[in-house]
Image: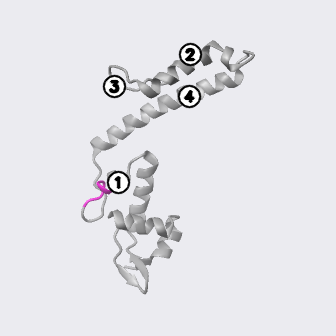
Amino acid sequence: MKLLDISEVSQQSGIAASALRHYEEKGLITSLGRRGLKRLFGPEVLDQLSLITLGKTAGFSLDEIKAMFGPDGHPKISRDKLEEKADDLDRQIERLAGLRDMIRHVADCSAPSHMECPKFRKLLRVGGRTRKRKSSTGRVHDLKGW
């Protein structure tokens, strides 16, 4: 098995060496030794880094991602956690779609000023409440159907 030094891992993964050292400190990856001052990693670290990057992109914290690895460093991902994250992403998509629709309306609105647009005024009222109040179901009000 050919070991990769930290600069090779950084080059092949596109992840800065400082981030690799941070991931090692957090226990997400493990170096197998050193060549001089450079950390050495097994080739499986590239798959681990791909999973870390994917997890971060999906919005998982580094601690949540760490829990996705078994003691052997292989993925051990909870399907329940994935379902929860998919539901969170659905809610984010819904909020962002509402925001996109609002921005398009404001950009195209024929009112002389945004403050004269009834939909924009309604949006301001909804937006003010969104930050402060949750519905009885515990969900934050979103902009969908504003």
Decide whether the magenta segment is chiefly helix, strand or loop: loop
Span colored in magenta: 65-70
Does residue 55 sit above or below 124 in this rendering?
Answer: below
Q: Is residue 4 above or below residue 52?
A: below
Q: 141 and 60: which one is in front?
A: 141
Q: Amino acid at mark 3?
A: Gly
Distance from the alpha carbon under mark 2 to that under mark 4: 13 Å
Q: How far is disc 2 from disc 1 in space, using C-alphas? A: 40 Å
Q: Name the residue tied to disc 4.
A: 99
Q: Earlier in the sequence, mark 2 or mark 4?
A: 4
Callout 1 crowding tier (Cα within 10 Å): few <14, some 14–19, many ≥20: some
Q: Secondary structure at mark 2?
A: helix
SS at mark 4 in the image: helix
How many marks the image carries: the answer is: 4
Q: Which mark is residue 122?
A: 2
Secondary element under disc 3, as helix, strand or loop, is loop
Q: Residue tagged by mark 3?
A: 138
